[in-house]
Amino acid sequence: MSMTDPLPQPTLHTERLTLRPFVVEDASAVQRLAGSKRVAATVPVIPHPYLDGMAEGWIATHADAWRDRKSVSFAIERPMNDAEGPVLVGAVSLLIGPYSRQTAELGYWIGHPFWGNGYATEAAREVVRFGLQDMDLLRIHASYMAGNDASGRVLEKIGFRPEGMRPLHVERFGKHHDLYVVGILRADAGDAGRAAP
Ligand SMILES: CC(C)(COP(=O)(O)OP(=O)(O)OC[C@H]1O[C@@H](n2cnc3c(N)ncnc32)[C@H](O)[C@@H]1OP(=O)(O)O)[C@@H](O)C(=O)NCCC(=O)NCCS
C-alpha cells in the first residue's frame, strides 16, 4: 500500500463482528457511547463533555486520514443476525507514526452496555492483523492508564508485551495516572502478522 493507493478503506469481518468505516449516521451513537464518563475516564483523547457536532467532526476526518495514511478508524458493529439488526458497539483505530510510517498506536473503546462480551478483544485482534499484514506495519503499540485492567487484559490476550511505564504521564479529570505501554512486533506476531523476514 502506498500514499497514492486509491483503495477505499476496507470492511473487516471477525467471527461475530463487522469492522467498517464510520458514516455520518453513526454520529448520535458515537456521541452517546463515547460521551459516557465511564468510557471517557480511561481515554484522555475523548472529549468530555461530548458536545453536539463533535462526533460528526471526528467522522469527517476519517476519509482524508485513511487516504494520507495517517490513521484508520473502524466502527465495531455487533452481529448482523441479531434480532434488532446491526448495532454500533464501539470503535477501534490505528494511528500511524509519528516517528515512522510503519509503526502505529492501537486505540479502542466499547460502549458501556456492551462491555464483557469479548468484543474489544475480537475487534482489536483483527485490526492488529490488518495493520501488520495488510498495512505492512512493523510494530503496533498501545498504552493504558493504571487501573484500566480490562484494557491491559485485552492487550495481553492479543499478544502485546509490556514495554514500560511512564509515571504520572496522563491527566484525566483532575488526576494524574501512570501509563503502561505495551507493543507487538510483526516479527513476533506469528499468525497475526507476516512471517519474520
Ligand atoms: C477496556 C474495554 C475496551 C474492554 O472492552 P470489552 O469488550 O469489555 O473487553 P473484552 O470483553 O474483550 O475483554 C475484557 C477482559 O478484561 C477482563 N476484565 C474486565 N474487567 C476487569 C477488571 N476490572 N480487572 C481485570 N480484568 C478485567 C475481562 O474478564 C476480560 O478478560 P478475560 O477474557 O480473560 O475474562 C472497555 O472496558 C472500554 O471501552 N473501556 C473504556 C475505554 C477504554 O479504556 N479503552 C481502552 C483505552 S487503552
Image (cartoon, rainbow, N blue to C red):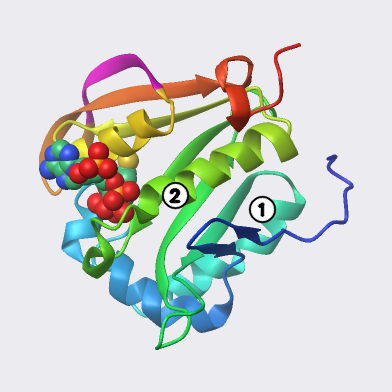
* Secondary structure of residue under mark 2: helix
| Rendered position, 61 above or below 101 | below
Residue drawn where x is 70% and y is 13% of the image: 196
Residue drawn where x is 10% and y is 39% of the image: 175
Quadrant where the C terminus is found in the figure: top right
- Please name the amino acid that badge 2 sits on: Glu
Q: Which residue is mark 1?
A: 65
- Please name the amino acid that badge 1 sits on: Ala
- Which residue is more in the foreground, 125 or 172? 125
| Rendered position, 129 above or below 180 | below
Instruction: Give the x, y percent position of residue 81.
Output: 49, 79
Region rendered in magenta: 161-169
- Dominant SS in magenta: strand
Instruction: Give the x, y percent position of residue 83.
Output: 40, 87
Q: Which residue is mark 2?
A: 122
Distance of label 2 from label 1 (alpha carbons): 24 Å
The response on whether ligand 1 sits within 8 Å of label 2 is yes
- Which residue is more in the foreground, 71 or 120? 120
* Secondary structure of residue under mark 1: helix
State yes or no: residue 77 in magenta. no
Instruction: Give the x, y percent position of residue 147.
Output: 13, 35
Residue drawn where x is 50% and y is 35% of the image: 105
Q: Quadrant of residue 48?
A: bottom left
